[in-house]
Image (tube, rainbow, N blue to C red):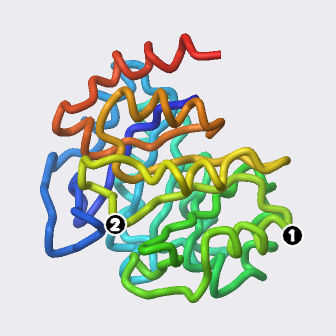
Amino acid sequence: MEVIPAIDLRGGRCVRLFQGDFAQETVYSDAPETVAEHWTGLGATRLHVVDLDGARDGVPANLGCLERIAGVVDVPVQFGGGVRTAKGAGRALTAGADRVIVGTAAVENSALVCELIDRYGAQRLVVGVDTRDGGVVLRGWLKRGGLRATELIDRMMDIGVTRFMFTDVSRDGTLTEPNFAEVEALAGRPGTSLIAAGGIASVDHLVRLANTGVEAAVVGKALYTSDIDLEEALAAVSVLP
């Protein structure tokens, strides 16, 4: 299982939100590319970059940061936040993203998802499945989408999506624990890969997630608060079968 550090961008800075609330922001760095170098220097094999401004406003706003991050690291970068058009996806990939993550568009514009698969291949697309109280949320986690996670995944599988990222928004940034029950229910579908996020607060959580069969876990706040030591985490999951 990959352990993927998260770099959340707002106004060109590296920040973390509490439960996706833009009013509860903690700034960790004015130089996200330096943060990226730090995590890769400790052994990260992939980075997860989120454009919070883009997620809220519908258009990627921190592509310059993405380009700088991709320019200083030698690992793949997956990017999400405001990717709701083919142009937006193309700009993100040109800026250095290895994969783009679509969430809102997966609910509101499945034709775009089909177009991205046709143009770039399913391996370069991740569908974000973000939930609160069991229901999918979208538009920067500010609007309910009227679906449950399983319904969205089933729809996307039908059109060729193979990789999903599940986040329980109510746990994101809380340092409580992941929604293990939901992760276990979603993991292991034939022909799909699942990335888990939200609430991860310890190496034990990562080991437990690895044992569910998820492909990767995205860790944010726990790395920035040193609740999780990245090198220790990578070592712990590397010895699992």
List x then y, in percent, for residue 120: 77, 58
In the picture provided, is 150 more to the left or to the right than 145? right
In the picture provided, is 173 more to the left or to the right than 83? left
Amino acid type at image mark 1? Asp
- Closest to the observer: 141 or 174? 174
Question: Where is 95 relative to 222, above or below?
Answer: below
- Closest to the observer: 178 or 195? 178
Amino acid type at image mark 2? Ser
SS category of the residue bearing label 1: helix
| Residue at image location 45% in from the left, 40% down from the top | 47
Question: Where is 8 relative to 104, above or below?
Answer: above
User: Which label's residue is closer to the chain start, 1 or 2?
Assistant: 1
What residue is pinned by disc 1?
Answer: 158
Give neighbour class at mark 1: few <14, some 14-19, many 20+ (Cα, 10 Å): few
- Total number of numbered discs in the rendering: 2
What residue is pinned by disc 2?
Answer: 170
Residue 51 is tagged as: none
Give neighbour class at mark 2: few <14, some 14-19, many 20+ (Cα, 10 Å): many
Which quadrant: the N terminus?
top right
| Residue at image location 70% in from the left, 75% down from the top | 151
